[in-house]
Amino acid sequence: MFSGLRLGNVNFLPPPLTFMTEINFFSETLQNNPFDHYHYLRQQAPVYRDSMTGIYHVSRFEDVRHVLQNPVLFSGQTRNIRAQTSERQQRVNTLFKEKGWLPAATLIGRDDPNHKQMRALFNEAFRPAKIEAMDEFVRETAEALFEPIAEAGTCDWVEAMAVPLPLTIIVKQMGAPASDLWRIKSWTDAFFKRISMMLTEEEEIACVEKEIEAQHYFQPIFERLRQFPDDTLLSDLVNKPIPEWGRTLTDEELHAEMMADTFVGGSETTTNALSAGIKLLIENPAVWDQLKADQASALRPFIEEVLRLESPVQMLLRRATEATSIGETEIPKDALIGVRYGAANRDDEQFACPAALDLGRKKPGAHLAFGSGIHHCLGAPLARRELWWGFKTFLDRVETAEFTPGRNDFSYQPHCLLRALKSLSIDIKVKT
């Protein structure tokens, strides 16, 4: 039984699931529909310790914001806690070292001042003027991708638009050939799966092998850019020194950033929001009518509601640097905190009728889908532009749309951190 948002644009909150005694975050059933469980957690166990992992899951908006805005107390450095010395992790590390490069800590896994110093490398690429300069390319890409959809009158929206639109943009920023897009996608899929917390060791090793394949693709590009810099973001990452460090990024740091913060961070989350938005649009015809009547003022709130309702990043981890408390729950030093963005963004203490797709909210961007504090997503402005042109192209060209009969099970990739619709088959009638 679908709940909340999947019942359409109605003001509905499910009752607490009082029969629960244990929540299994590794359950694909939960991951396909986590929202009843989130409601239960917010009401009954706002700081819930998972007995399987020891992670303290935080689900209320104010508590999540508290964790995100206190980075000294809640560190992004979780790598040394997450079984880095286990035999399995050592085998993974050895494979990276022997066949490729062991990825260093990524930007999100660093604390200030180290984080701030490294983030400055990326800030230039995502300043407003550069995002504005990319706008025409984003629009042209969305419109070009839509042409075969319009001609066929049917598609898997995930494959036809949601994946290639943001990935094409980041491929251009990285200076890789557009012809290698789907090859790069196979590598980002491997990283996506490896961070899912859902794999057997054999499956994880297979993903590492794919990542190492990607490393050997990009390493010659790093070396070329060191000799012949250009105007791409990747050239900046390769060549610009971090003043406080007195050096440029190492190969290990570059390979980590390529997978985590550029290709996956720069495309996967936008893909998931583009997929979720079209699903929501078809499920909520009254909202589509609002967008038809006044797209100019309704499209931005629609984008924010998609981000709030679906939260492409459902959870990330933090580590308590000292013993503390969240609400009434004592948190021991070095405990891992599961920051549940997906739960916080549907908190009825923060949002009226939180399961409803409401374009009239007074502060439509007041959600946590892009995080908060020092780790707020620096690619958020570009992601919003990609969502704008992806949805606008659909709205400008499509008269009616429906789910292709018998082709959708609306299932999501098994993942503890991200929310990714596997496919979305739709039939459309284009405007004449």
Image (spheres, helix red, strand yellow):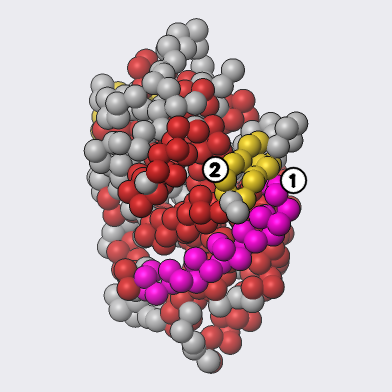
**Outermost residue to the bottom:** 227
- Give the camera-side residue of 280 and 328: 280
Give the residue at mark 1.
202
**In the image, 370: left or right of 194?**
left
At 42% from the left and 12% from the top, the residue drawn is 16
Q: Nearer the viewer, residue 79 or 132?
A: 132
**Residue that numbered label 2 is attached to:** 278
Q: Quadrant of the N terminus?
A: top right
Q: Residue placed at 41% from the left, 33% from the top?
A: 357
In this view of the protein, which residue sits in the foreground, 322 or 226? Answer: 226
Foreground label between 1 and 2: 2
Label 1 residue SS = helix
Query: Callout 2: few (<14), some (14-19), or many (20+) C-alpha neighbours within 10 Å?
Result: many
Q: Is residue 359 above or below residue 117?
A: above
Query: Is residue 209 located in the magenta-colored stretch of the structure?
Result: no
Q: Which residues are magenta?
A: 130-156
Q: Residue 143 location, x and y as percent?
A: 57, 63
Direction from residue 331 to residue 205 in the image, left or right: right
Indicate the quadrant where residue 381 lies.
Answer: bottom left
List x then y, in percent, for residue 401. Answer: 61, 41
| Residue 171, image quadrant | bottom right
Q: Amino acid at mark 1?
A: Glu
Give the residue at the far front of this rendering: 432
Amino acid at the residue labelled 2:
Ile
- Compared across the picture, whether 320 is left or right of 219 comes to left
154 within the magenta span:
yes
**Residue at image location 47% in from the left, 12% down from the top:** 17
| For residue 332, above or below residue 263 | above
- Confirm or deny contact between disc 1 and disc 2 (CB under 8 A): no
The rendered magenta stretch, by its main secondary structure, is classed as: helix
Reading the chain from its start, which is encountered first: label 1 or label 2? 1
Instruction: Tally the marks.
Output: 2
